[in-house]
Amino acid sequence: MVNTRDEPHADSDLFRRLHVIVGDSNRSQTVTWMKLAATHLVLCVIEQAWRENRPSGFERFTLADPGEAIRSVSRDRTGRAPLRLADGTTTCALTMQRAYLAIVEDFLTAHGELVVPSDGDHDVLALWHQALDAVEADRWQDLASWVDWAAKLRLIQAMRQRDPNLPDARIGQIDLDYHDIVNGTIFPRLEHGGMMRTLLDEAAIEHAVGNPPENTRAALRGRFVKAALGKDVQFSCDWTHVTLTSPERMDAELLDPFSATPTEAYERVLAVLG
């Protein structure tokens, strides 16, 4: 579930921000990538439909009560729990996902050149198919190495085999620990034990921490922070501003998320930092 925020973290005349407001943190690298890529493709379909002044195809799946639907889907491993639609009919998660996937595939066939970046589109579609096929056939074990809920279920079932009297409170603790990004221990153990599919190794992750993408404003923020840390200055940095507060106050706006071209104001700030 998402809503639009009134803080776009960019030029408000050009951008709006979609804010995820429900769901546990994904830990699997693979499913995180798939989630973001699939959402990106769905948004591409909607944007192109708006540009062409036509329906996207998703409209017929408008839910009567999204909150109720989320609760139903979250408790249903089969993907077949009935979901009420705004037009008075019912559907299920599998049917909706199959339809969304088909719409995205048709879009890529017709407008694939419009999707940026396009690397990995077909890999995403393949994973999407695999996930739906596994859920439909009740082969959740096929997903246990890259889908978080299946990974947790595999772990809990293994623990129950060792201890049939495993308390519910302990299961709840496992559930919370798995999603704890800061202090959780369960997911790192699964990953280091080779039980989770990964896309990046530790070296690539460490490199990314200190080397922002060179084709976005993150590169400008990174240059500013690196320069400021090397000087005796006070500074701040957020999504849209880099600011020196001492010894003199200077500020530069970075309103385009996809531009790494420094503005004149940014160059003046960097010049002060030498």
Image (cartoon, rainbow, N blue to C red):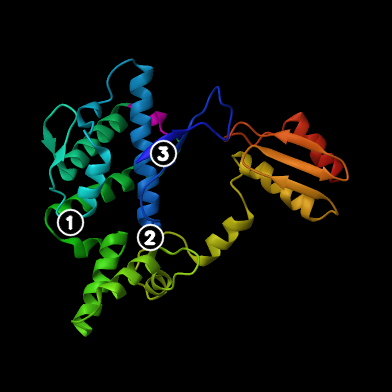
The residue that disc 3 covers is: 118
Q: Which mark is residue 28?
A: 2
Q: Is residue 48 above or below residue 181?
A: above
Q: Quadrant of residue 209?
A: bottom right
Q: Which mark is residue 10?
A: none
Secondary structure mostly seen in magenta is: helix
The residue that disc 1 covers is: 77
Gap in Å between the C-alphas at discs 2 and 3?
22 Å
- Identity of the residue drawn at 24% across and 26% down: 59
Secondary element at tag 2: loop
Residue 252 at x, y = what percent?
73, 34
Given the current orientation, which residue lies at the most extreme top position?
Answer: 53
| Left or right of 242, for residue 172 | left
Residue type (three-letter) at the residue carrying disc 2: Ser
Q: Nearer the viewer, mark 1 or mark 2?
A: 1
Residue type (three-letter) at the residue carrying disc 1: Arg
Residue 14 at x, y = what percent?
53, 24
Q: Quadrant of residue 28?
A: bottom left
Q: Nearer the viewer, residue 186 or 225?
A: 186
